[in-house]
Image (tube, rainbow, N blue to C red):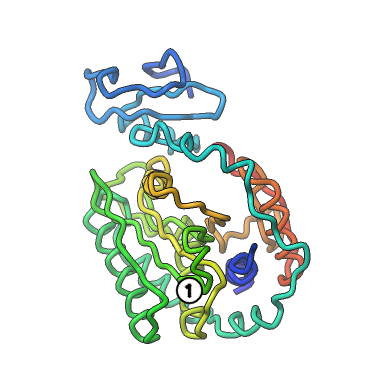
């Protein structure tokens, strides 16, 4: 419940805002875009993998990519999004100002009081009952269909025209991403959403297509966290100033594929995302630290991160702890 409230308070506040060297690799000569004709043809299912921001991408087979997962090495599969971010790079210098004070206590409690851990437990039990949520698998597609129907039913029961949901289909795999949206009251901000996200897929790193992979923690917890926040907002008639979107991404475990595809579409359509908060392993409490809000501080926007910390300290009731995710 405490971690769910962090996702909720981010919505309420923000919506009102004005490689290893021991196996064979094909190393690129530069970090520039590599056309498909340059990809080696000797192996099946080769993908262009970025292992670090300051390293050139390399071509890897699926077996090599699975080895990365087993060795806990983060990566991005940039094969289909090599130019991502270039068209809108100028917007980094035109960010919207963040609120200097927090004044949403009354609105926050209106929604947080509607959160239910019982709902979350029931939803997570169902979500983890699928044999695996691997993005290429039949049950990965089935789990996405269940999640989509759950969201659709919430919207239909609310009898509102300001909330919608759509499937974001991907080329090359079965599991679709899901985008639910609260339209904003200010039509001039229709192209400036705030995004609350999580990834819906899971992976068994030894047998990805057939092995059991309930993914309760990674990232069933994040998916159900934002689902419960979405439910609470819908049922209480949430009407944000600017659009607020909830994203459930497919293919995260395979190199952030789903989120990159969504970002690529948004870039092409010139959507100016104001802020995005990702919820991953939201229920995890290890043996090293006590229960806390783990705020990632690497590869993020410092100002937005400071704002989230401010929100957590103002509205939350557990400590804030800085943590690092590493590349991808």
- In this view, which residue lies farthest toward the front? 188
Question: Which residue is label 1 attached to?
Answer: 230
Q: Is residue 153 above or below residue 88?
A: below
Can see residue 24?
Answer: no
Where residue 260 appears, x then y in whole percent? 41, 44
Answer with left or right where residue 16 lies relative to residue 234.
right
At 43% from the left and 33% from the top, the residue drawn is 68
Can see residue 285?
Answer: yes
At 45% from the left and 52% from the top, the residue drawn is 271
At 40% from the left and 55% from the top, the residue drawn is 249
Answer with left or right where residue 314 lies relative to residue 214.
right
Where residue 272 appears, x then y in whole percent? 51, 52
Label 1 packing within 10 angstroms: few (<14), some (14-19), many (20+): many
**Between 239 and 221, which is closer to the camera in this rendering?**
239
Q: Is residue 35 above or below residue 293?
A: above
Answer with left or right where residue 230 lies relative to residue 11.
left
**Between 267 and 11, which is closer to the camera in this rendering?**
267
Where residue 83 appears, x then y in whole percent? 42, 32
At 59% from the left and 71% from the top, the residue drawn is 8
**Between 22 and 58, which is closer to the camera in this rendering?**
58
Quadrant of the frame with the N terminus? bottom right
Where residue 160 appears, x then y in whole percent? 39, 83
Tally of numbered tags: 1
Q: Is residue 33 above or below residue 83?
A: above
Snapshot quadrant of residue 254: top left
């Amino acid at each position: 419940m405490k971690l769910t409230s962090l996702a909720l308070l981010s919505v309420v506040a923000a919506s009102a805002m004005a490689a290893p060297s021991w196996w064979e690799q094909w190393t690129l000569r530069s970090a520039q875009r590599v056309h498909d004709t340059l990809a080696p043809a000797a192996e099946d299912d080769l993908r262009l993998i970025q292992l670090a921001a300051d390293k050139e991408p390399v071509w890897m087979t699926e077996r090599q990519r699975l080895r990365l997962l087993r060795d806990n090495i983060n990566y991005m599969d940039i094969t289909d999004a090599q130019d991502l971010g270039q068209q809108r790079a100028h917007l980094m210098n035109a960010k919207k100002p963040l609120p200097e004070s927090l004044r949403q206590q009354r609105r926050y409690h209106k929604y947080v009081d509607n959160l239910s851990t019982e709902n979350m437990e029931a939803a997570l039990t169902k979500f983890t009952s699928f044999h695996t949520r691997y993005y290429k698998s039949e049950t990965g597609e089935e789990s996405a269909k269940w999640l989509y129907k759950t969201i659709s039913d919430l919207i239909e029961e609310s009898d509102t025209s300001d909330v919608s949901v759509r499937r974001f289909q991907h080329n090359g795999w079965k599991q679709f991403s899901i985008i639910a949206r609260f339209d904003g009251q200010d039509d001039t901000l229709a192209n400036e959403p705030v995004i609350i996200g999580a990834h819906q897929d899971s992976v068994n790193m030894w047998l990805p297509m057939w092995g059991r992979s309930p993914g309760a923690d990674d990232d069933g917890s994040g998916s159900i966290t934002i689902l419960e926040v979405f439910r609470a907002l819908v049922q209480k008639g949430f009407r944000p100033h600017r659009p607020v979107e909830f994203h459930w991404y497919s293919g995260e475990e395979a190199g952030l594929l789903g989120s990159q595809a969504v970002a690529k579409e948004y870039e092409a359509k010139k959507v100016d995302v104001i802020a995005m908060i990702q919820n991953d392993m939201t229920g995890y409490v290890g043996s090293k630290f006590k229960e806390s809000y783990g705020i990632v501080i690497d590869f993020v926007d410092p100002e937005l991160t400071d704002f989230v910390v401010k929100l957590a300290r103002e509205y939350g009731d557990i400590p804030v702890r800085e943590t690092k995710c590493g590349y991808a």
